[in-house]
């Protein structure tokens, strides 16, 4: 089993802290998704097999 961890580059920690303060709900959602992703990696799931998130049809359709 591999160990996966966050690797902060440059001023990423400061930006993350500001994001947490300005958008707490979105921050929690992002962190939950990252946690789920890291758990899948730790279980041995290859990153490419996790796929892309599905889009909501109403947001991707074009207005005519």
Image (cartoon, rainbow, N blue to C red):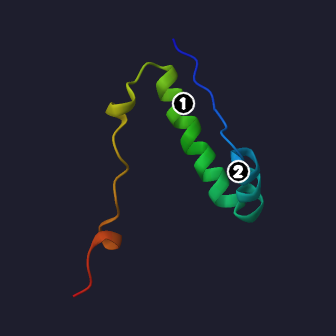
Mark 1–mark 2 CB contact (< 8 Å): no
Q: Residue at x 60, y 44 (%)?
A: 32
Residue 39 spot, x, y in % from top left: 53, 28
| Residue pointed to by mark 1 | 38
Residue drawn at 74 percent across, 65 percent down: 22
Q: Nearer the viewer, mark 1 or mark 2?
A: 2
Residue shown at 76% from the left, 50% from the top: 14
- Residue 59, placed above or below residue 43: below
The residue sitting at the left extreme is: 64
Q: Nearer the viewer, residue 50 or 9?
A: 9
Give residue 49's mark: none
Classify 10 Å Cα crowding around label 2: few (below 14), some (14-19), many (20 and above): few
Q: Position of residue 17 (x, y in %)?
A: 76, 52
Structural distance between the alpha carbons of marks 1 and 2: 18 Å
| Label placed on residue 16 | 2
Task: Give the camera-side residue of 52 and 17.
Answer: 17
Residue located at (26% from left, 78% from top):
62
Relative image position of residue 27 (x, y in whole percent): 66, 54
**In the depicted view, which residue is nearer to us: 58 or 4?**
4
Which is nearer the eye, 39 or 2?
2
Q: Is residue 28 left or right of residue 59?
A: right
Marked residue nearer the N-terminal end (1 or 2):
2
Check disc 1 and report its element: helix, strand or loop. Answer: helix
């Amino acid at each position: 089993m591999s160990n996966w961890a966050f690797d902060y580059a440059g001023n990423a920690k400061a930006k993350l802290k500001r994001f947490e303060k300005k958008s707490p709900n979105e921050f929690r959602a992002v962190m939950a998704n990252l946690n789920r992703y890291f758990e899948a990696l730790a279980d041995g799931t290859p990153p490419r097999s996790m796929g892309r998130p599905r889009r909501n049809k109403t947001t991707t359709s074009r207005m005519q």
